[in-house]
Image (cartoon, helix red, strand yellow):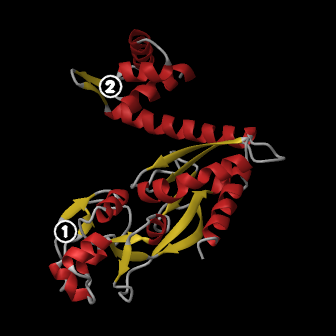
């Protein structure tokens, strides 16, 4: 099978259309279509179902794409390791973490890392779902749980604590809760998504209540940053991570004796990158920055 045709096939499979794949590859839609037709003719199997709304992989196409994705992932990892300088960290580093942690804590600190290591470039992928490190969707992940995939190296970075917060304006209007039962008569802001980025993110709805009878939120929003902004506006009370509380001026921490779950954070990467200088210096940078929190 021709590598160029496989590269085009993979781009089409990921994009779901000849036009979008052509934009990615800087090829015309007709050129992409010709390459796919030639590959199908060489293999003597259909790779896509063609319909008005786009393309869907056939069973044979799914099988081929799984293999091609794995091959290109391995090639990308090998290229990164071969091009990395033996003398100093260099090359591209693809990092993924949750939207809340990445936007609020990590992104503002990356200038210091990239200034310290000018031969490293970074792609930051913020996603509340886990990207597949084995398939090289990212080189490194900062995760709010231990890794589930085998053959991943993990390093515990820190434990996140929750702070129950409200704005001074809200407390002036509604009073300050002094015990957990008081939350029943207050306006809560909760994380509103069926796949939250952190386990027990809505623990404030359950604490002090009978199992299966949580408090309802006045507002549910699938963004920790939006929750903080809503608290700042005086809308209600929310439990927010300590790294966000530290970055937010003016919020009042309440119910400080309330026992909240902790979130363990891990630095995770594939076994193949164990000797990567880029990964090592980024890990050490994070540990040094996190040590300044204490």
Residue 2 appears in the picture as rendered: no
Q: Residue at x 23, y 24 (%)?
A: 53
Q: Residue at x 40, y 75 (%)?
A: 162
Q: For mark 1, what is the residue?
A: 217
| CA neighbours of label 1 inside 10 A, class few (<14), some (14 to 19), many (20+) | many
**Residue found at the very far right of the displayed protein:** 87
Q: 72 and 268: which one is in front?
A: 268
Count the labels in the image.
Answer: 2
Q: Tell me where residue 30 sits by quadrant.
A: top left
Q: Earlier in the sequence, mark 2 or mark 1?
A: 2
Q: 202 and 31: which one is in front?
A: 202
Residue 47 appears in the picture as rendered: yes
Q: Residue 112 in the image: state x and y as whole percent.
A: 66, 52
Q: Is residue 12 left or right of residue 75?
A: left
Q: 63 and 293: which one is in front?
A: 293
Q: Is residue 279 left or right of residue 47?
A: right
Tell me the element at label 1.
loop
Q: Residue at x 28, y 89 (%)?
A: 178
Rendered image: mark on residue 48:
2
Q: Residue 209 in the image: state x and y as whole percent.
A: 20, 85
* Vertical side of 206 occupied by 179: above or below: below
Label 2–label 1 contact, CB within 8 A: no
* Vertical side of 61 occupied by 189: above or below: below
What's the CA distance linking mark 2 and mark 1?
45 Å
Q: Nearer the viewer, mark 2 or mark 1?
A: 1
Q: Is residue 186 left or right of residue 5?
A: left
Q: Residue at x 60, y 51 (%)?
A: 110
Tell me the element at label 2.
strand
Q: Residue 219 in the image: state x and y as whole percent.
A: 20, 62
């Amino acid at each position: 099978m021709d590598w160029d045709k496989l590269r085009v096939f993979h781009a089409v499979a990921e994009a779901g259309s000849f036009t979008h794949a052509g934009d990615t590859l800087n090829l015309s839609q007709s050129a992409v279509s010709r390459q796919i037709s030639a590959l199908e003719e060489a293999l003597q199997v259909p790779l896509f179902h063609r319909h008005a709304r786009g393309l869907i992989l056939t069973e044979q196409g799914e099988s081929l794409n799984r293999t091609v994705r794995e091959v290109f992932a391995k090639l990308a990892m090998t290229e990164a390791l071969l091009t990395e300088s033996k003398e100093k960290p260099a090359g591209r580093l693809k990092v993924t973490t949750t939207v809340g942690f990445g936007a609020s804590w990590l992104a503002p600190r990356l200038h210091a890392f990239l200034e310290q290591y000018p031969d490293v470039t970074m792609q930051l992928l913020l996603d509340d779902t886990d990207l597949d490190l084995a398939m090289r969707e990212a080189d490194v992940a900062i995760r709010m749980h231990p890794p589930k995939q085998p053959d991943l190296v993990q390093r515990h970075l820190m434990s996140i604590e929750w702070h129950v917060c409200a704005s001074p304006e809200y407390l002036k209007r509604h009073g300050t809760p002094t015990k957990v039962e008081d939350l029943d008569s207050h306006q809560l802001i909760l994380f509103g998504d069926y796949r939250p980025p952190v386990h027990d993110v809505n623990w404030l709805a359950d604490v002090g209540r009978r199992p299966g009878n949580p408090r309802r939120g006045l507002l549910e929003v699938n963004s920790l940053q939006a929750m903080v902004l809503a608290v700042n506006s005086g809308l209600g009370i929310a439990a927010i991570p300590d790294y966000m509380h530290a970055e937010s001026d003016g919020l009042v921490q309440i119910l400080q004796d309330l026992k909240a779950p902790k979130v363990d954070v891990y630095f995770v990467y594939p076994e193949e990158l164990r000797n990567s200088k880029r990964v090592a210096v980024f890990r050490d940078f994070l540990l040094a920055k996190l040590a300044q929190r204490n």
